[in-house]
């Protein structure tokens, strides 16, 4: 059966899977990245794509899509700028096409995840959709009038870098102060915990526990257990998340906002439900209660499934047209 390969390139690992027309991931391979040196990242991508091809059968592959972080020039296939990778002007497509014998289509990773969630997941059936991926950073994407918004230079959806606290916020990797990402990502939850730590002198929240990874998950676990220090950080973090989400509602008035990424998978009772109350209080010109705020439904696979859908569509040019459900049986498109 024909399939496309979706590749999701993240800051610490790369995943690739063979994806059928109905969005089912039939074969998936993941690999940690020891380095972000472009030539070595290309080696790893090549290696796992060859692995997927060997598992799924090379002859049935009809295209490859790749979601990568940063701003991408889709005509040249160059990653212009990726602060988290520290990449400037990396010609990723030409580096990879020398190795891969299939058409390769590139799109920002968060836009790929948006495409995946829109066609197959939490955005299915709506024409007005937004995805916010909350992890180490914040990414996003908008669908409006059934079209994935790309913008004039592929920058539409960079919601992580709209500023919500210019005077008292945390500094962002992009060099600005108080970006939504700096205030409301998983990393930001740790910053909020540090910021209120002096009010909880006996707290052990930020002490590294044996066998526990130091990260936002340990704080979310402590919130669930009712830890006072964690709860104070969580409230401040939720306040900032609500500011960004209410802004996003005013940008495109989506019917559904899905919360994706690792943090987006938090129990709705702890995340989506209190968030909706705060967002409603901040929503003014758009009628309150119109936008449903939900957990993204494809989990960690959204990026792989979306990148595969991009390949099935035949590239970003096809995104200029309205999307009507699942892309048809793939044509053997040229990149
Ligand atoms: Zn920023």
Image: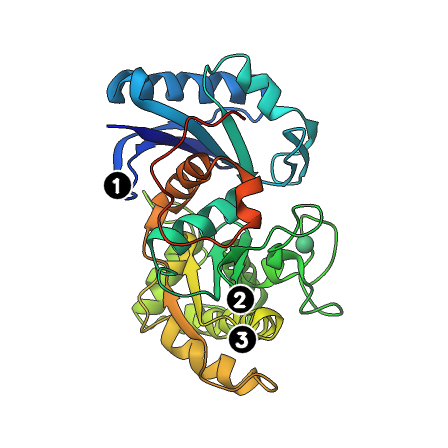
Residue indicated by mark 2 = 197
The quadrant holding residue 177 is: bottom right
- Marks 2/3: CA–CA distance: 18 Å
Residue at 58% across, 69% down: 252
Q: Nearer the viewer, mark 1 or mark 3?
A: 1
Instruction: State the separation of the CA atoms marked 2 and 1.
Output: 45 Å
Q: Which mark is residue 244?
A: none
- Residue, disc 1: 24
x, y percentage for residue 231?
Answer: 42, 73
The quadrant where residue 140 appears: bottom right
- 81 displayed left or right of 287: right
Q: Position of residue 81 (x, y in %)?
A: 69, 37
Badge 3: few (under 14), some or many (20 or more) residues near its Cα, within 10 Å? Answer: some
Q: Nearer the viewer, mark 2 or mark 3?
A: 3
**Most foreground residue, 288 or 188:** 288
Which secondary structure lies at badge 2? helix
In this picture, residue 301 sits left or right of residue 129 = left
Residue 205 visible: no
- Above or below, comparing residue 278 to residue 44 in the picture: below
Vertical comparison of 58 with 174: above or below: above
Q: Earlier in the sequence, mark 2 or mark 3?
A: 2
- Name the residue carrying label 3: 239
Residue 260 x, y percent position in the rendering: 42, 56
- In which quadrant will I find the C terminus? top right
Q: Secondary structure at mark 3?
A: helix
> Which residue is depicted at the point 42% across and 63% down?
258
């Amino acid at each position: 059966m024909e399939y496309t390969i979706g590749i999701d390139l993240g800051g610490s690992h790369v995943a690739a899977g063979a994806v059928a027309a109905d969005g089912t991931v039939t074969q998936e391979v993941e690999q940690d990245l020891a380095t972000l040196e472009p030539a070595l990242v290309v080696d790893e991508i090549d290696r796992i794509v060859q692995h997927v091809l060997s598992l799924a059968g090379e002859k049935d592959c009809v295209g490859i899509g790749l979601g990568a972080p940063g701003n991408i020039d889709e005509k040249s296939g160059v990653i212009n700028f990726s602060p988290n990778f520290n990449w400037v002007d990396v010609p990723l497509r030409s580096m990879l096409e020398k190795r891969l014998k299939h058409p390769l289509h590139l799109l920002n990773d968060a836009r790929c995840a948006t495409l995946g969630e829109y066609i197959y997941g939490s955005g299915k059936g709506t024409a007005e959709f937004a995805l916010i991926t909350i992890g180490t950073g914040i990414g996003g994407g908008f669908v409006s009038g059934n079209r994935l918004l790309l913008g004039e230079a592929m920058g539409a959806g960079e919601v992580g870098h709209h500023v919500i606290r210019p005077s008292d916020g945390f500094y962002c990797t992009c060099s600005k102060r108080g970006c939504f990402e700096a205030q409301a990502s998983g990393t930001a939850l740790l910053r909020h915990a540090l910021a209120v730590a002096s009010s909880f002198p006996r707290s052990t929240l930020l002490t590294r526990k044996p066998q526990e990874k130091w990260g936002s998950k340990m704080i979310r676990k402590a919130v669930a257990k009712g830890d006072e220090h964690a709860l104070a950080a969580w409230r401040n973090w939720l306040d900032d998340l609500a500011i960004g989400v209410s802004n996003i509602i005013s940008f495109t008035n989506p019917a559904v906002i899905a919360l994706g990424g690792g943090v987006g998978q938090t129990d709705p009772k702890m995340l989506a439900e209190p968030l909706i109350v705060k967002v409603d209080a901040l929503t003014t010109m758009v009628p309150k209660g119109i936008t449903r705020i939900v957990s993204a439904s494809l989990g960690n696979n959204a990026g792989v499934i979306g990148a595969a859908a991009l390949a099935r569509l035949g590239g970003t040019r096809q995104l200029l047209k309205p999307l009507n459900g699942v892309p048809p049986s793939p044509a053997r498109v040229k990149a």
